[in-house]
Image: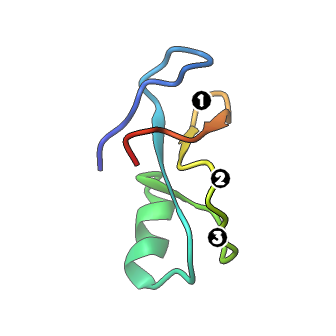
Amino acid sequence: MSKYICPECKKKEAVQILYGYPGDGMMESAQKKEIVLGGCIIYPDNPNRQCLKCGHQWKSKKG
């Protein structure tokens, strides 16, 4: 999984936030800090990135 640059702290420590009921693969990826689990409730304006360094969440226009 790719890491993204955080708009808040400018570190390349952000990962995707994935929503929905997590299967085994998602759980493994979350434990490895490759993704963040966002929960089962999905709204159109939910953030889709989270910085692992500072915790900032945001919605990327790239999806």
| Residue 22 pos. (x, y %) | 52, 80
Q: Amino acid at mark 1?
A: Lys
> Percent position (x, y) of residue 7?
55, 20
Tell which circle, 1 or 3, labels the residue nearer the N-terminal end: 3
Q: Which amino acid lies under the numbered mark 2 shown in the image of this protein?
A: Asp
Pinpoint residue 32: horizontal percent, then vertical percent.
43, 57
Q: Which residue is mark 3?
A: 42
Residue plotted at (48% across, 36% down): 14
Label 2: which residue?
45
Decide: is 24 above or below 30. below
The residue positioned 65% from the left and 54% from the top of the image is 46
Q: Are marks 3 and 2 in contact (CB under 8 Å)?
A: no
Label 2 neighbourhood size at 10 Å, few (<14), some (14-19), many (20+)?
few
Mark 2 vs mark 1: which is more N-terminal? 2
Residue extending furthest toward the left: 1
Residue farthest toward the top in the current orientation of the protein? 10
